[in-house]
Amino acid sequence: MLIKLLEPLRVPEEMIEELAQPIKEMGHEFVYYSEKTTDPAELKERSQGADIVMIANNPYPAEVIEAQDQLKLINVAFTGVDHVDGEAAKNKGIKIANAAGYSNQAVAELVLGLTLDLYRGITQGDEDIRQAEQFAGPFQGREIKGKTVGIIGTGKIGTLTAKLFKAFGAKIIGYNRSEHEEAKELGLTYVSLEQLMAESDIISVHLPLNESTKGIISHDMLAKMKPSAILINCARGPIVENDALAALLNEDKIAGAGIDVFDMEPPIPADYPLLQAKNTVLAPHVGFLTDEAMVLRAKIAFENTVAFLKGNPQNIIGE
């Protein structure tokens, strides 16, 4: 079979070569493109003749998928696969695998980082102290200990995030379609989404993006939040109605927001409301992006390829 890695994975090329060695030893061909492209025509060309393509968070649209005759697997070195046209893949009988789990720790730690920044004014304090003699005075913050943290989505990342918040002394409540024993063993109490939004001091979003979750954190849901509460979103931007979030922040109806994901990938348009919203800490979709996570995702992605070649597919979406 012909396996093509269509974009770099943020690890040294020496590691790519090492991870690809088992594929070559099995008698398969491996091709690596060291520069990223988002041009559909170039993606079609790169994918031509491949039985397996490996990508990261590069968009892989329907027009590219439909042009492939040999393709059997789209191996995504990423947790979310909403940047791949799943319907087009299904129509052609092409399976999709992901690298779930590689960034659990990285995302959970960023949630805590954004929370601490909002609670202690770290970014604001840095800007203030640089005013030298114009320094207006220190920011009086808050502590996580004793606060109620609402975890929306108690999968692996949500549960790990709950564990970190519990270590700070927070009370944990959660919302999910089904209850998970691991989360309950931490002391997490499941409640309705409405109750979570109304009772939480800190809300952290950890749902996947799909038709049922898009916009689930609506204006009405956001309006249930305490004026002192903050929202952290390191999951997917469209899960939250971000225009409504920006409006409520500017009206002081919500105390703050830490946002790593938007309705589009950065760069963000200058008129995007969250860029002008009060009391926000914004990050450029870096929740997954640590040295350790990049190494782990590369390993998982190549393990997915080897497993598929051996006839034992793993991490297949929808199976």
Image (cartoon, rainbow, N blue to C red):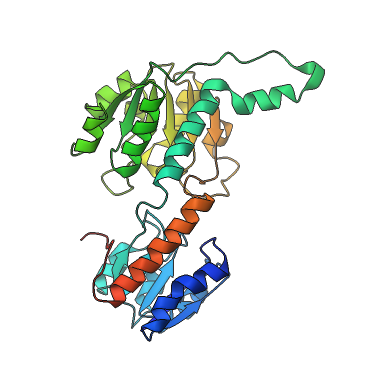
Locate the N terminus by quadrant. bottom left
The residue that appears at 40% across and 53% down in the rendered structure is 102
> Can you say whether 266 is above or below 143 in the image?
below
Image quadrant in which the C terminus is located: bottom left
- Rendered view: 11 above or below 257: below
Residue 136, x across and y down, in percent:
72, 14
Nearest the viewer among 240 and 128 is: 128
- Which residue is depicted at the point 20% across and 39% down? 177
Q: Between residue 280 and residue 264, name the one nearer to us.
A: 280
Q: Quadrant of residue 139?
A: top right
- Decide if residue 127 is in sight here: yes
For this orientation, the residue located farthest to the bottom is 27
Residue 245 lies, in percent from the top left, at: 44, 30
Can you see residue 37?
no
Residue occupying the point 35% across, 38% down: 160
Quadrant housing residue 276: top right
Instruction: Tell me which residue sits at (22%, 31%) in the image.
Output: 184
* Total marks in image: 0
- Quick check: 91 left or right of 296? left
Q: In x, y percent, where is residue 301? A: 39, 64
Is residue 31 shown above or below 121?
below
Residue 120 at x, y = what percent? 55, 21
